[in-house]
Image (cartoon, helix red, strand yellow):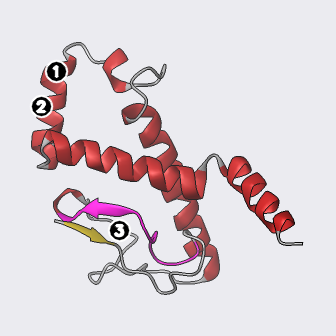
C-alpha cells in the first residue's frame, strides 16, 4: 500500500526534483494534480518550476503537521472541530486508512518535516560537531 515516490535524482534535496524522496504517500489517498502529467511527472520541468513545486510541497507538509501531528498544539484540528471523534472516523474513511495506518502516515510526515523542512538548525549543528570531531 505504501510506496515511495519516484525521483530523478535521490541525492538532490527534495524540492529540486520532480518528487520528494522519502516522503511516502498511500497511493489511494493522493489527489490528482494539474501540475503533473499522466505519468506523475511535472508538466514544467525547468529548475525554477521544480524548486517552486518543492517549496509549495514543503509548506504543505509543514502546515499539515501543524493540523494533524501535535495533539497539544494550538493549531491541532481537534480544537476547531465540533465533534472530533466523528470527524476523525469520517476523515479516515475518506482517506481509506485505518487508525494505525493514519498514525503511521502522521509519523512519516513528521519525519519528512523534521529531516527536510523544519528543525534543520539542530541537524546542522550536529553535522558541524561531527565534522569537528574528525580533525
Identify the residue position indicated by label 1 in the image.
Answer: 85
In the image: residue 18, left or right of residue 82: right
Residue 90 in the magenta stretch? The answer is no
Please say if the residues under marks 2 and 3 sit with CB atoms less than 8 Å apart.
no
Q: Position of residue 15 (x, y in %)?
A: 56, 69
Q: Position of residue 78 (x, y in %)?
A: 31, 20
Looking at this view, name the residue that lies furthest to the right: 135
Q: Which residues are magenta?
A: 16-27
Q: Position of residue 1 (x, y in %)?
A: 16, 65
Q: Nearer the viewer, residue 16 or 98?
A: 98
The residues bearing labels 2 and 3 have C-alpha atoms spaced at a distance of 29 Å
Which residue shows up at 35% across the image and 25% down it?
A: 77
Secondary structure under the numbered disc 3 in the rendered image: loop
Q: Nearer the viewer, residue 93 or 3?
A: 3
Secondary structure under the numbered disc 2 in the rendered image: helix
Q: Main secondary structure of the magenta part?
A: loop
Which residue shows up at 86% across the image and 64% down it?
A: 132
Identify the residue position indicated by label 3 in the image.
Answer: 34
Please say if the residues under marks 3 and 1 sit with CB atoms less than 8 Å apart.
no
Q: Is residue 31 above or below residue 118?
A: below
Q: Is residue 96 visible?
A: yes
Which residue shows up at 35% across the image and 73% down it?
A: 5
Disc sitting over residue 89 in the figure:
2
Secondary structure under the numbered disc 1 in the rendered image: helix
Q: Is residue 80 visible?
A: no
The residues bearing labels 1 and 2 have C-alpha atoms spaced at a distance of 6 Å
Point out the tag, 3 or 1, that comes first from the N-terminus. 3
Say which quadrant the C terminus sits in. Answer: bottom right
Amino acid at each position: 500500500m505504501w510506496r515511495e515516490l519516484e525521483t530523478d535524482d535521490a541525492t538532490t534535496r527534495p524540492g529540486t526534483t520532480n518528487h520528494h524522496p522519502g516522503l511516502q504517500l498511500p497511493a489511494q489517498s493522493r489527489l490528482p494534480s494539474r501540475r503533473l502529467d499522466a505519468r506523475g511527472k511535472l508538466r514544467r520541468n525547468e529548475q525554477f518550476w521544480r524548486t517552486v513545486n518543492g517549496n509549495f510541497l514543503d509548506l504543505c507538509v509543514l502546515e499539515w503537521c501543524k493540523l494533524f501531528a501535535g495533539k497539544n498544539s494550538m493549531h491541532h484540528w481537534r480544537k476547531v472541530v465540533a465533534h472530533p471523534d466523528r470527524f476523525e472516523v469520517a476523515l479516515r474513511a475518506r482517506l481509506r486508512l485505518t487508525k494505525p495506518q493514519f498514525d503511521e502516515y502522521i509519523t512519516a510526515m513528521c519525519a519528512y518535516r523534521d529531516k527536510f523542512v523544519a528543525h534543520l538548525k539542530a541537524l546542522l549543528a550536529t553535522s558541524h560537531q561531527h565534522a569537528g570531531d574528525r580533525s
